[in-house]
């Protein structure tokens, strides 16, 4: 009996290792940015869970999506906290949403967006960042999005997808943070720590020339470097894809960001959505781990008495003198005062 059990164990182990190699080969784990052809192949083999991260209505999702794709987007993973939109859901709520999407810690997940504009790819990057933050590390991005998939006449489906709910629980490594809060931002502005602030929005937002009603004040965080995430995408005619690593590195350097020192990056935008694109580029292209997304971003920061600048005179090396922080809006709750 012991011999039989040993044989069965060896056979089972062999099957597991074979399956693991198959997943690795088909997903090309040396790069977490996949082509549409790679994704179609993985779908046919049934070795991935596909996530539709487009910020669209459920009705539009039901009209067309990739085969077996499950709807999970930024709006489903965030909430308005106080008057600050785009804040991450609390862990227990986040677990429920991810479990309802049929995901588990060891899922191989491919995420795609619309691919119709130079900023659409960030919809997928945002979901990927939140899944990583929740402990799901085998996350891949399909370059070109639905627009490229459709242009290549690959198969589409319509209607709802049956999902087997899991018992997902967040497993987070505390020494590998992905998101940071207002406390961390203030520590850096006070000079207690050193980091680059990266503004992922466009120039009008950076200079405070926008009229976004979500912002109490308009402008940027002192010391921030402006790097719009739309710069990382290129127009391929019917769709947008991400530029190659060499061009992305040049974009970062040309905007004043050093890639050689070990200082962390803190990316922000209005709500943390576009900021996820900076995190994605750093992790999926540069393999740089010390990058944080400021949860709350300018929608929260603008409600404090911390300085907001409207010009581009500040560089990433400059810091504000120590200043007090007090939120104008007490509805933010636990973040109302530091």
Image: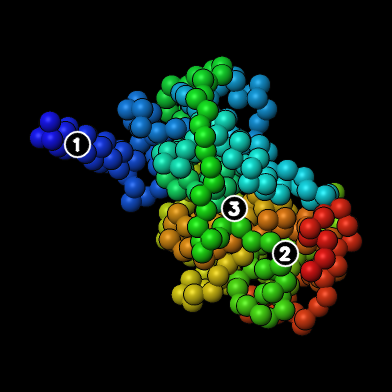
Between disc 3 and disc 2, the foreground one is 2
Residue lying at 72% horizontally and 71% vertically, measured from the top left: 186
**Which badge, 1 or 2, is on the more N-terminal residue?**
1
Q: CA distance from mark 3 to mark 2?
A: 17 Å
Q: Marks 3 and 1: in contact by CB < 8 Å?
A: no
Name the image quarter holding residue 180: bottom right
Among the two numbered marks 1 and 3 on one chain, the one whose residue lies closer to the N terminus? 1
Give the label, 1 or 3, closer to the camera. Answer: 1
* Relative vertical location of residue 277 with respect to residue 44 in this rendering, above or below: below
Q: Is residue 254 visible?
A: no
Left or right of 281, for residue 218: right
| Residue designated by label 1 | 9
Residue 178 higher or lower than 123, as above or below: below
Distance in Å between CA atoms under marks 1 and 2: 51 Å
* Colour scheme in use: rainbow
Could you tell me residue 6's position as x and y percent?
14, 37
Q: Which residue was labeled with disc 3? A: 276
Mark 3 or mark 2, earlier in chain: 2
Split into 4 quadrants, where in the image is the N terminus? top left
**Which disc, if any, is residue 313?**
none
Can residue 275 be seen? yes
**Residues at discs 3 and 2 in contact (Cβ within 8 Å):** no
Number of numbered markers: 3
- The crowd level at tag 3 (other Cα within 10 Å; few <14, some 14-19, many 20+) is many
Q: Which mark is residue 182?
A: 2
């Amino acid at each position: 009996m012991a011999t039989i059990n040993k044989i069965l164990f060896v056979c089972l182990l062999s099957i597991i290792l074979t399956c693991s190699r198959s997943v690795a080969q088909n997903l090309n784990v040396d790069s977490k940015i996949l082509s549409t052809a790679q994704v179609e192949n993985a779908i046919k083999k049934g070795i991935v869970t596909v996530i539709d991260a487009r910020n669209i209505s459920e009705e539009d999702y039901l009209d067309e999506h990739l085969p077996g794709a499950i709807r999970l987007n930024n709006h489903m993973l965030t909430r308005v906290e106080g008057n600050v939109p785009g804040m991450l859901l609390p862990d227990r709520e986040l677990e429920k949403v991810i479990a309802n999407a049929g995901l588990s810690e060891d899922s191989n997940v491919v995420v795609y967006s619309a691919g119709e504009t130079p900023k659409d790819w960030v919809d997928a990057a945002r979901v990927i960042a939140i899944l990583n933050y929740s402990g799901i590390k085998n996350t891949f991005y399909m370059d070109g999005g639905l627009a490229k998939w459709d242009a290549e006449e690959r198969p589409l489906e319509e209607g709802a997808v049956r999902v087997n709910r899991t018992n997902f629980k967040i497993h987070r490594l505390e020494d590998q943070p992905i998101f940071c809060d207002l406390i961390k931002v203030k520590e850096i502005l006070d000079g207690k720590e050193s980091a680059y602030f990266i503004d992922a929005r466009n120039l009008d937002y950076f200079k405070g020339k926008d009229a976004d009603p979500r912002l109490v004040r308009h402008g940027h965080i002192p010391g921030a470097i402006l790097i719009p995430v739309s710069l990382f995408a290129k127009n391929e005619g019917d769709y947008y894809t991400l530029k190659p690593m060499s061009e992305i590195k040049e974009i970062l350097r040309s905007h004043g960001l050093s890639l050689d020192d070990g200082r962390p990056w803190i990316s922000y935008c209005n709500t943390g959505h576009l900021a996820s694109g900076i995190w994605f580029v750093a992790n999926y292209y540069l393999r740089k781990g010390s990058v944080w997304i400021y949860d709350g971003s300018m929608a929260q920061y603008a409600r404090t008495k911390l300085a907001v600048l409207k010009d581009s005179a500040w560089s990433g090396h400059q810091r504000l003198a120590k200043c007090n922080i007090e939120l104008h809006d007490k509805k933010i709750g636990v973040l109302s005062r530091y």
